[in-house]
Structure formats: structure tokens, C-alpha cells
Image (cartoon, rainbow, N blue to C red):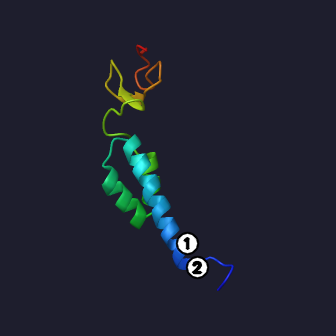
Amino acid sequence: MTGSVKPVFLLFLIIIVSGVLGGFMAADRGRRVPLWCLLCALLPPLLLQLYFSRPLHEVEGIFRKCLKCGELIKWYALVCKYCKSKQSG
């Protein structure tokens, strides 16, 4: 089988890529990185769950709490999308 990619190699590539993506997304959302790496490697559809989930707590440079309502908003947001209060820079 020269010149073609073996199916086993593609399977390992999918497992590795989905595990790494899951780890990066978990870190951005303040979740447990090793656990989500393993879960996303074994079950790649969990990447969608992780992508659409809200962060659990503040993540430096990515998410912060609103000063008025306490909801998590993007770090660079000037106005809270929940209570419409202005945020200090």
C-alpha cells in the first residue's frame, strides 16, 4: 500500500487533533484541561459542547466578571451584554 494513507493513521490523527483542540478550548473556558483532552479525544463531538459552553470562572485575558451584575463577559467588552452597564478599562 504505497502512496496512500492508512486508515489507522487517520484515526490517530483525528484522536490527537480533537484532544489538543479540546485542551485549548477547555483552558480558554477555565475548565480542567487534562480531563477535556481525554474526553474530546475519545468522543470528538464533545468539542461542540465545549465550544458552546460558558466559562466557569474568570480567565485572565479572556473572560471577566461584570462590575454590576457579576455575569462573565469578554475581557475587552466596554459594556456588559446582560445589564448594559459600562465597564472600566
Percent across and percent down for residue 69 are 32, 22
Looking at the rendered structure, which numbered label has been put on residue 73?
Answer: none
The residue carrying mark 2 is 6
Residue 30 drawn at (x, y percent): 33, 41
Q: Secondary structure at mark 1?
A: helix
- Side of 18 relative to 59 (left or right): right
Where 2 sits versus 35, above or below?
below
| Structural crowding at the residue carrying mark 1, measured as other residues with C-alpha within 10 Å and reported as few (<14), some (14–19) or many (≥20) | few
Rendering quarter of residue 87: top left
Residue 56's image quarter?
A: top left
Q: Of all residues shown, which one is farthest toward the bottom?
A: 1
Please tell me which residue lies in front, 8 or 52. 8
In this orientation, does residue 75 appear? yes
84 above or below 28? above
Mark 2: few/some/many CA within 10 Å (<14, 14-19, 20+): few
Location of the C terminus (image quadrant): top left
From the viewer's perspective, is residue 89 above or below residue 37?
above
Determine whether label 1 and label 2 are within 8 Å by CB: yes
Q: Hey, which residue is sitting farthest right in the picture?
A: 3
Q: Amino acid at mark 1?
A: Leu
Q: Secondary structure at mark 2?
A: loop
Query: So how many labels did they put on this image?
Result: 2
Q: Between marks 1 and 2, how big is the CA–CA gap?
A: 7 Å
Q: What residue is shown at x 30% (from left), y 49% (from top)?
A: 32
Identify the amino acid type marked 2: Lys
Q: In x, y percent, where is residue 88?
A: 40, 13
Residue that label 1 marks: 10
Q: Quarter of the image holding residue 6?
A: bottom right
